[in-house]
Amino acid sequence: MTINHALYHYVRPEVVDKLTSDDLFKTLPSQATRYAYAEAILELGEKDPRIVVLDADVSKSIGTNKFAEKFPDRSFNFGIAEQNMMAAAAGMATTGLIPFASTYAVFASMRALDQVRNSIHYPHLNVKIAASHSGITPGPDGVTHQAQEDISIMRALAGSCVIAPADSPTTKQAVYAAAAYEGPVYLSFTRDPVPILFDESFPFEIGKAVTIRDGDDVAVIAMRDLVIQALIAAERLAQEEGIQARVIYCHTIKPLDTEAVLQAAQETGAVVVAENNVTFGGLGSAVAELLVANYPIPMRQIGVKDTFAESGPYLEVIHKYGLTAPHIANAVREVLAHKARFFKQPNLSAAIV
Amino acid sequence: MPASNSNHSKAPNGKMSIEDLQKMAVQVRLDIIHMIHKAKAGHPGGSLSAADIVTALYFRVMNIDPHNPDWPDRDRFILSKGHACPVWYAALAERGYFDKKHLDTLRRLNSILQGHADMKKTPGVDMTVGSLGQGLSAGVGMALAARVLKKDYHVWVVIGDGEAQEGAIWEAAMAGAKWKLDNLTVVVDNNGIQNDTFTDEVMPLGDLPAKWKAFGWHVMEIDGHDMAQIVPALEEAKTIKGIPTVIIAKTVKGKGVSFMENVPAWHGKAPNDEQAEIAISEIRRQLS
């Protein structure tokens, strides 16, 4: 069965062609989004003298060592001292500089959370937190380095802006947008390579979710590394079961694009949220909070349940912990069965407006 | 509210004599007691212990403009021990950053004076503080920023001795030495008491001068209530090149109020009407 390319928006055609092949992850060009961040910050450093980069002894892992080589006067390695780095970034931001504080997500969102909350978010200072190894994307490193809670934690901070891009091109766009945004931004990157899904024509705007596949049976809302998993699930469901899933790339978890989510909910009547993050407090919770107050329809969450994961190759780990396309497809089937029962309820039109 | 002496609060260049600084510190102490009594909550002990240091900075040492609190070239001040913010508010009000009537509103709803200092609410507050061990890191960031921006302002950070139990203080100390931040000066308000009781009982700080020296700082030790020692030390700190300076100031918690001095219970409790009256009369007597 041929793939209907017209249903897809902004997704590179060679990606669409591969959605049903088993060798997608082996054959598509891919890159860890941390490296896209490092490239973007190098370009930004050239354009804007206010950009400074702060590291905490993982500049080689993230690639910000290239910024340090090129702009030694605007690069500061704080060593293994993330708390000091975050509050120092806050101090720098008070002077009009635009600090990008770079470390792993576990340390950015947890080790240094007190500084991130009180010194950065409370005074709403213009600090960008560049967090690599977000979610369970550092498969082999194991639990201590898997930030399965970072999105939930960062979303809970007042006035926070939380962005989790799906691939390298949109990561670069996100970094540029974050630099232009006034206020703290948390940027979440992957440790492991993810396929390059989009190109520079992607209409990236903070807070704007984008429909990347049309469909009216169900809406699958996904972030970061599960966007590709959502696309795979959607195409397989279309080919094998005739189910047309709308796929929404929700790169900004906060502020949530409430208009896009509600519109998708109203037009499809069933929602699945897919995130490589715990199911408590992240994107799934954000969507659920919105729907329960405005348009309470059947919904399912794909995310890390109440468990820690383990070491292993990235794709094997996220599969074992329920985050891959087959799990999303199952959630779609479940939510569609629920939708069928749900919309048969008497007086439903009075209950749902 | 105790009236301030207009002779010294309006010093034309903000550079007071030692004698006038002593008088101003008395006024700052009166303001501290007044506002904590009025708020029925707050931290008098650590505010009073830092009063002379903060007064010297705001009325003699720092290059600041109260009419232009966001002046990019100003010296920065961070009271990292943010619970002692009544001393900061008193100094800012006396220096003319905002009307003294605001001191009546400490810790009240809609006040510009939060229970711990908020840079977005209070003119002159250069950094939001309260969670201990963060202000020095912010000061490191400001000192580094001066280099990037090619500015020659100085960053002054007052920390508590108890606060030095926070590991992040020592992370920042390492960073100050690494980057040879001679535009950064720390004053340790070494009053020997923290929330629960004496620091030596809770978690001894050990040999503070030796610790800072080992971290690569220029160390000075002074009596933190003697203006004739405070002012020269602060002035000297500005002249030390290639290394950050820490001034370890021996202070008395609750200084100036006999029943508060060196009594741990006065770390975080407001005086009642009678206690406030006694405190104010005791402090006033120091004017003569």
Image (cartoon, helix red, strand yellow):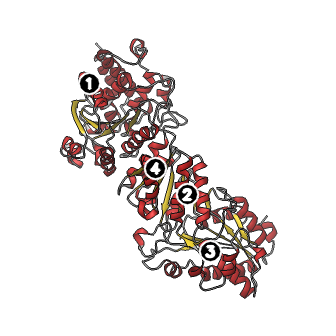
- Chain where mark 4 sits: A
Q: For the residues tagged 2 and 4, is the chain the same?
A: yes
- Chain where mark 1 sits: B
Q: Say left or right for A211 vs B83.
A: right
CB-based contact (under 8 Å), mark 2 and mark 4: no
Q: Which residue is label 3 attached to?
A: A228
Residue at 35 percent across and 27 percent down: it is B57
Q: Is mark 1 on a helix, strand or loop?
A: helix
Task: Give the Cα distance between marks 4 and 1.
Answer: 38 Å
Residue at 32 percent across and 50 percent down: it is B171
Q: Which residue is label 2 attached to?
A: A40
In the picture as drawn, the residue positioned furthest to the front comes out as A70
Task: Give the Cα distance between marks 3 and 1.
Answer: 65 Å
Q: What residue type is labelled 3?
A: Ile
Q: For the residues tagged 3 and 2, is the chain the same?
A: yes
Instruction: Choose between A172 and B189: the one closer to the eye.
Output: A172
Say which quarter of the image contains residue A241: bottom right
Say which quarter of the image contains residue A231: bottom right
Residue at 34 percent across and 32 percent down: it is B47
Image position, residue A279 (x, y; %): 55, 70
Instruction: Choose between A208 and B191: the one closer to the eye.
Output: A208
Q: Which mark is residue B232?
A: 1
Q: Quadrant of the C terminus of chain B?
A: top left
Q: For the residues tagged 4 and 1, is the chain the same?
A: no
Q: Say left or right for A224 vs A117.
A: right
Q: In which quarter of the image is the N terminus of chain B?
A: top left
Relative to B17, say whether A202 is above or below: below
Q: Which amino acid does label 4 sit on?
A: Phe
Q: For the residues tagged 3 and 4, is the chain the same?
A: yes
Say which quarter of the image contains residue B48: top left
Q: Nearer the viewer, mark 3 or mark 4?
A: 4
